[in-house]
Image (tube, rainbow, N blue to C red):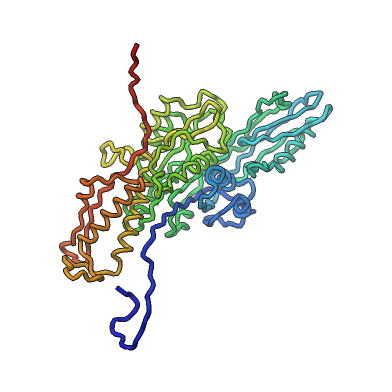
Amino acid sequence: MVANIPGDIVAPLLAFDVESAGQFSSETKMALLGHGLAAGSLAESGIVLCSSVNEARALVGRGSMLESMVIRVFQNAPSQELYLGRVADTGTAEIRTVTVGVIPADGGQGVLQIAGEDVSIEFAAGTTANAVATLLAVAINAYFNPASKKSLPFTATVATNVVTLTARHKGAYATRLDTFVPVIEGGNAFNGILTFATTVPGAGVPDVSAILAAMGDEPFEIVISAFGDDANRTKLDDFHNNTAGRWSYAQQLYGHVFYPKMGTTSELTASAVAKDTWHLSMIPIFTNAGNATPDYEFVAAMIGRIAPLLGSGSDGRVSVNQTGLKVEGVLAPRDRTYWPGYATRDALLKNGVSAWKVNSSGDVITDKIITQQQTTNGVPDTVFRDIQAPYQLTYALKFHRAALANEHSNKAIVDDNPANNPNLRTPKDIKATLVNSSVQLQTRGVVEASQDLLDQITVARDADNRNRVNIILPIDRANPLDIFAGLARVYA
């Protein structure tokens, strides 16, 4: 068939029309939803491509929530295609005070850890408390980690021995930001001389609605939201639902949302069970554990670490077990009793909460990321529990759609085609395409395609609308190898 050369021309001609034979290519775009600063060029409710940490700083401002999330993603997924969605902050910015007490007579080195970053100053013997406070405030405002390109989530001012910290963004998120006097080799001169207080608690929860609207028809397979409150996660879930959302027949854009949640084990599981959906994944943060890394950085790093797997349908890595991957750029809880053991992780996973663990070196590593699916129509259902499932399905559906489009677009449908007219297609032709694409997906390691399953593929013309074919396409996804349960039989 030649699409663009008319069939009724008479004048001599030797020409070739050119068209693509079709080559499937999948992409996995990530969108980060968080706060930016007015100093950046990205307006509130705007979304834009970001290719580096330096570009993020220009777009959303130094020390912003989004900049720090970008840093953590690129530490774990350096080549990830990344977009920033700036959600407007609202409410009240948190204000804290750090009062400097009696200074050691010999002076020394003082280190204050803020959001996992060590701010260090040195002061000589005889330095006054006010002078130390001034040095500390200057160091906080000037802080920049050249290795990670990280700045701090607070700005500082000083007055009479007191450093005042103000969160860069409004909102209750700042109540979870950590300040801590660490133990260091040789002694920390700040030990016992700093008094912390919160004078104005952060208050207010943002609304992601405007940024979701700004996404338009652009596909974002991975969405990481800094906000895990009930109202926003419901909006994110609805945005991706199967009826009219991104997983519906009307959009076919797909995508999945990851968010952090802080609480006790019982609070986390209760929250997850209350939102039964396979479009959301909760990354747990434990209350009072000494969480140096902010929760929005933790979730960005964790999902950044598995993002290359989620997007790898061509080589089957989308299906593999994800346990034991070191998550770069995050610190384990200071309180080791909150390093989740097997029983805790198993309980979380049985109740819709993802799990991570800490290895013997003190590194945070992946354990198992899952969705929050618990039931379907009130009946227990684990088909979409593994995080691999929505991404295997995304790749498979895109692959099938591409195959159908390449082979059957701009054709007519008939029951039989005895002359093999290239402009005509039969239900058998369409089924053959789906069988072939299923086998190809099996060779890629995305699905299993037994003969019995291939036989179940059904393509039939609609009885009322003869322009339409109805398809039943069973998909048996490959399963991650999570558990080895062996018997060690010992002989004497």
Q: Quadrant of residue 383?
A: top left
Camera sees residue 81: yes
* Position of 359 relative to 64 (above/below): above
Q: Quadrant of residue 153?
A: top right
* Position of 13 relative to 323 (above/below): below
What residue is drawn where x is 23% and y is 49%? 454
* Position of 123 relative to 203 (above/below): above
Residue 232 in the figure: left or right of residue 398: right
Q: Nearer the viewer, residue 52 or 199?
A: 52
Residue 308 in percent (x, y) is at 47, 46
Residue 199 in percent (x, y) is at 63, 35
Camera sees residue 172: no
Q: Nearer the viewer, residue 7 or 256?
A: 7
Residue 150 in percent (x, y) is at 63, 43
Q: Quadrant of residue 376?
A: top left
What residue is drawn where x is 42% and y is 59%? 217
